[in-house]
Amino acid sequence: MNQNLIGKTIRNRYHIIEQIGRGGSGVTFIAEDRQCFNDLCVVKKLQPQSNNPQALDVARRLFDTEADILGQLGNHDHIPRLLAYFEENQEFFIVQELIKGRDFSDEIAEKPYFSQEAIVDFLEDVLETLVFVQEYGVIHRDIKPSNLIRRSSDSKIVLIDFGSVKQVSLHNNQQKPLNKPTVIVGTENYIPIEQVMGNPGLYSDIYALGIVAVEALTGKLPCDLPVDRQGELIWHDKLQDKSQYSPQLLKAIDKAICHYHKQRYQTAKDFLEDVRALKNKALLKSSYKIKYFTVVNLFKKNIIKAILFFILTITTLGIVFVVWQPKKMQYTNYANQDYGVKINYPENWEIRKRDDFFISGIIFISPLESRQDSFQENVSVFVENLVSDTSLNQYTAESIAEIKRLSDPNISDAKLTVLGSYEGRSIVYEGEEKGSVVKRMQIWTVHNSKAYTITYTAKPDSYETFLPTIKQMVASFDVF
């Protein structure tokens, strides 16, 4: 296939628009999915070093590894979803979700330095993703600013480019040493010595992330920084204002970038615990200051002004109580011919479509209720093709077993219900989403060799609040 793919359509589906990256392993493009409403996606073409059989075997191994691991990592919110992968004319293609945003290297270039709050938030964001990745024994091996995208929609950091990944065996949460050195991959300045020697571990990604933090704080790469006799980077004196950073933060980053890997954090979970401790300490100090100054200022106020303010507040609240009436929720109908389903949903909720070879469906997402609201309640409607003779009871047993294995062993018993005029089952259980505990209600039915599943997800403390809305949605659901 011609190297210049711009303007061409691959597999009669992915129309290449522009090239956005090139590296040692391949070329990356933005494309339109002509079979899915021209949605934009990322197409990565793996570039074998040559066309000889040995080089093709190596390329095929890397390709299969990346696709397999992306499939294992599933639908984590901070990792681009795998949409498709295929080989064509001895060339290899991976299709992924396009993340709209800007890479972290742009932020480093624009800011003179990052505050403690900004760097702690950044580290927490990336480490939450790495904790999930490392649960699968996966080493990314190429963490750097350009592979960290701040998503435009919510300002969260998304980890991209899993083309250099490696899986290691984990036993009792300990890393099992590799039997033989691996191919040396990664980007100069961000890879530790053990990775250069071909023996990376989970701690190698910790080093790379720590180096990104040093670069954000100082604006300098390791090649521009001196090292001491033990091989440790000397960087504290490059901070523009060292007094604004806590010694605990600097110590944590120092531990992450230790030259000798056994002195580093061994996992992202260990690093994340210390980062969150820093954040909690900062919040505690901030809360104390606010409460202290509020009390002092209140005592300084004139008592007459305080009384007048109290009277005005009570009067206003009384007027609001009498006049204000809650607005009735307005619903809009959604129908999808491809899935053969229809449902009513709140008109101010966002709709996102998911359609790939794993599962098909729609997700309805509630708006944020305030600036402090950190979780958007959502309802998903998924359609799954089944083996023709799968019964409702068999599907129920398999679904509950899978939930117990992956999420909540204390799941409620399945209750008899009706979904879309057909007999169904419903369960309630707790799980985890984006690092938070969530409560889920799941309802499903089986009809014409398809499973139709509605899942309501909310924080436990807001679960009951949205339940009337969810019941309206479930009652309106129908299959056609």
Image: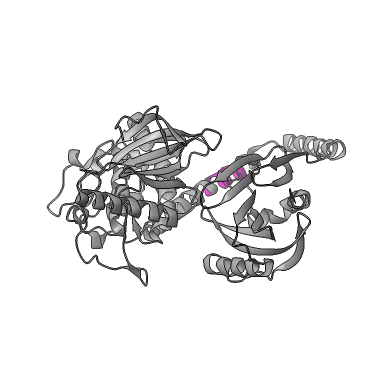
Q: From what the image shows, is residue 305 above or below residue 366?
A: above
Farthest residue to the top: give it: 7
Measuring from the top left, give residue 212's x and y in whole percent.
31, 43
State whether residue 24 is above or below residue 3: below
Residue 34 is left or right of residue 56, and the answer is: right
The answer to whether any part of residue 404 appears in the image is: yes
- Side (left or right) of 416 relative to 198: right
Asked if the stretch drawn in magenta spans residue 56, the answer is no
In the rendered image, residue 289 lying in the magenta stretch gets the answer: yes
> Which range of residues does the magenta coloring cover?
288-296
Q: Nearer the viewer, residue 405 or 269?
A: 405
Q: How many numbered dots are placed on residues in this image?
A: 0
Choose between 25 and 196: the one closer to the eye: 25
Picture coordinates of residue 409 (x, y %)? 58, 71
Kindly report the secondary structure that dominates the magenta region of the rendered protein.
helix
Q: Is residue 113 above or below residue 252?
A: above
The residue sitting at 62% across, 46% down in the picture is 363
Tell whether 228 sits left or right of 371: left
- Residue 380 at x, y = what percent? 63, 50
The image quadrant where one finds the N terminus is: top left
